[in-house]
Image (spheres, grey):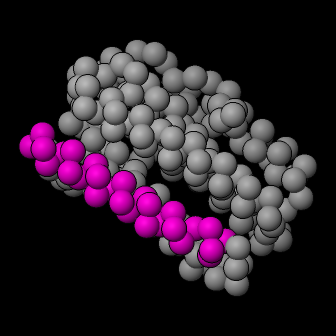
């Protein structure tokens, strides 16, 4: 369903398991960015009624996830700390095409969001199946289901503004590029992506 062209290296979850505090911190920042991305899309495209209707509840859900991650961090004595950059997302954002019709740019932004959700979903699945903290296994299983739903939502929303065949072709191209990005990045157990 997610269509990822390159699976996460299975060693990532072992490394992540050894630095679960860093994973939780990075995850908190990812949830913040997910909420703000939806807000930014609503601000940029307020005249797209379907977009506003669909993304508004996702803003609340992503912010709720941020609060859930903070709760898990607090239970374990971890602090949010300094702001982090996400090189994976920075690289994905370069796939957005500038110029041309605005719907094409909107489609690219929505599909980039879908890719982030797909990769997060895959990594949450790995965490839910393999980390030693049993409580966090359940936590990540619940979030995995949510991320899969968001992936579908972003792809479906792109189809509201561009023809389905155009969206499918662009998504496939972006999935290939996403695989190259994953392959090029050093495997880090302290980052969600």
**Residue 181 visible within the image:** yes
Q: Is residue 113 above or below residue 186?
A: below
Front-most of residues 97 and 14: 14
Quarter of the view holding residue 169: top right
Quarter of the view holding residue 117: top right
Quadrant the C terminus occupies = top left
In-image side of 170 versus 136 (left or right): right
Residue farthest to the left?
77
In-image side of 10 versus 53 (left or right): left
Front-most of residues 139 and 105: 139
Front-most of residues 188 and 162: 162
- Report the residue at 40% width, 51% height from top: 30
- How many tags in the picture? 0
In-image side of 122 versus 85 (left or right): right
Q: Is residue 23 above or below residue 165?
A: above
- Where does residue 5 sit, x and y in percent of width and height? 68, 27
- Where does residue 123 sit, x and y in percent of width and height? 46, 31
Quadrant the N terminus occupies = top right
- Report the residue at 80% width, 65% height from top: 160
**Residue 94 visible within the image:** no
Q: Is residue 54 in the magenta section?
A: yes
In-image side of 26 versus 162 (left or right): left
- Where does residue 119 sit, x and y in percent of width and height? 54, 37
Q: Is residue 70 in the magenta section?
A: yes
- Where does residue 10 sit, x and y in percent of width and height? 46, 16
- Report the residue at 43% width, 43% height from top: 143
Instruction: Give the extent of the magenta segment.
Output: 51-77
- Report the residue at 25% width, 32% height from top: 135
Q: Tell me the chief SS of the magenta region.
A: helix
């Amino acid at each position: 369903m997610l269509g990822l062209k390159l699976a996460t290296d299975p060693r990532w979850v072992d490394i992540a398991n050894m630095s679960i505090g860093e994973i939780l911190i990075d995850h908190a920042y990812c949830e913040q960015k997910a909420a703000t991305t939806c807000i930014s899309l609503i601000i940029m495209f307020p005249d797209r009624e379907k977009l506003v209707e669909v993304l508004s509840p996702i803003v609340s859900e992503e912010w709720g996830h941020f609060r859930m991650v903070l709760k898990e961090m607090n239970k374990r004595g971890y602090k949010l700390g300094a702001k982090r950059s996400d090189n994976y997302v920075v690289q994905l954002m370069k796939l957005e095409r500038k110029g041309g019709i605005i719907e094409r740019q909107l489609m690219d932004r929505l599909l980039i969001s879908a890719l982030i959700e797909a990769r997060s979903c895959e990594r949450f699945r790995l965490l839910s199946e393999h980390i030693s903290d049993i409580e966090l296994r359940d936590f990540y299983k619940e979030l995995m289901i949510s991320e899969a739903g968001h992936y579908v939502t972003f792809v479906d929303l792109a189809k509201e503004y561009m023809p389905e065949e155009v969206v499918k072709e662009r998504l496939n191209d972006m999935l290939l590029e996403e695989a190259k990005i994953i392959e090029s990045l050093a495997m880090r157990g302290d980052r969600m992506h």
